[in-house]
Image (cartoon, rainbow, N blue to C red):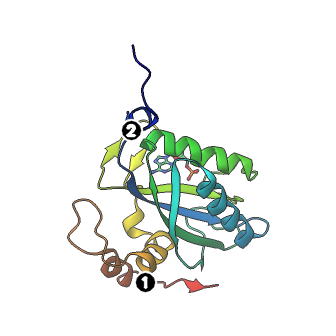
Amino acid sequence: MPPKDKETVSGQGCKPPVTVYLGLGSNMGDSRANLQRAVALLDLHPEIKVERVSPFLETAPVGYLEQPHFLNGVLQATTTLSPQALLAAAQSIENRLGRKRTVRWGPRTIDIDILLYGDLVLKSADLTIPHPRMQERAFVLQPLALLAPELRLPGCLETVGALAQKLAHPAAEK
Ligand code: AMP
């Protein structure tokens, strides 16, 4: 077989990048630095390009209340990773930043969630997209609305901006 030229080889198997939104949260250590490091590590991944990052908002804990307030943000990125591979990349960054899984919904140095992956709707054993209950959660919707107010979740008539406005407790920018 004749050798393939570089262009042909690099063009093979290329998938078009998908726009994704990731939710970030931290309430242990220097939360702002943890969020910034997570953004930087995600962007360092060869198949993830961070496009925009929301302001970081301080929010009250949900679920397990006896813990410090969170700092939350959302980023928009493009990726050629599959949803599963993106989850693995996010979890490896969580581990690298010292996340210990102890109490469910408990304190964490960093939490990285896949909120949206294009307009994909997926429910598997370890991955649900859009992220479960994101429509009701101020700590997700408010930073997302600052980034992409006109965005609509798959199958949802209302924009993210309209959904965020309906929430009772606005989060404060920090
Ligand atoms: P958490 O404690 O919030 O980091 O939850 C992590 C668990 O949620 C992991 O075991 C994931 O497999 C699961 N999970 C389900 N859907 C998602 C999603 N969209 N993004 C991140 N984790 C998810």
Q: Is residue 66 visible?
A: no
Q: Mark 2 points at which residue?
A: 11
31 left or right, relative to 56: right
Please identify the quadrant where the N terminus is shown.
Answer: top left
Locate residue 162: give its quadrant. bottom left
Which percent across, then down, holds residue 4?
42, 26
The foreground one among 74 and 28 is 74
Q: How crowded is mark 2: few (under 14 residues within 10 Å), some or many (20 or more)?
A: few
First of labels 2, 1 by sequence position: 2
Q: Residue at x 72, y 69 (%)?
A: 31
Q: Which residue is drawn at 47% across and 69% down?
A: 140
The foreground one among 110 and 65 is 110
Q: Can residue 143 be seen in this view?
A: yes
Which percent across, then down, holds residue 149?
35, 79
Residue furthest to the top: 1
Please identify the quadrant where the C terminus is shown.
Answer: bottom right
142 left or right, relative to 111: left
Q: On screen, 150 above or below 113?
A: below
Q: Which residue is drawn at 60% across and 75% down?
A: 60
Classify mark 2: helix, strand or loop: helix
162 left or right, relative to 168: left
Q: On screen, 97 above or below 152?
A: above
Q: Which amino acid does label 2 sit on?
A: Gly
Q: On screen, 168 above or below 139?
A: below
Q: What residue type is labelled 1?
A: Ala
Classify mark 1: helix, strand or loop: loop
The foreground one among 41 and 127 is 41
Which percent across, then down, holds residue 39?
62, 62
Q: Mark 1 points at which residue?
A: 168
The disc placed on residue 32 is none
Is the residue marked 1 within 8 Å of ligand 1, measured from its CB?
no
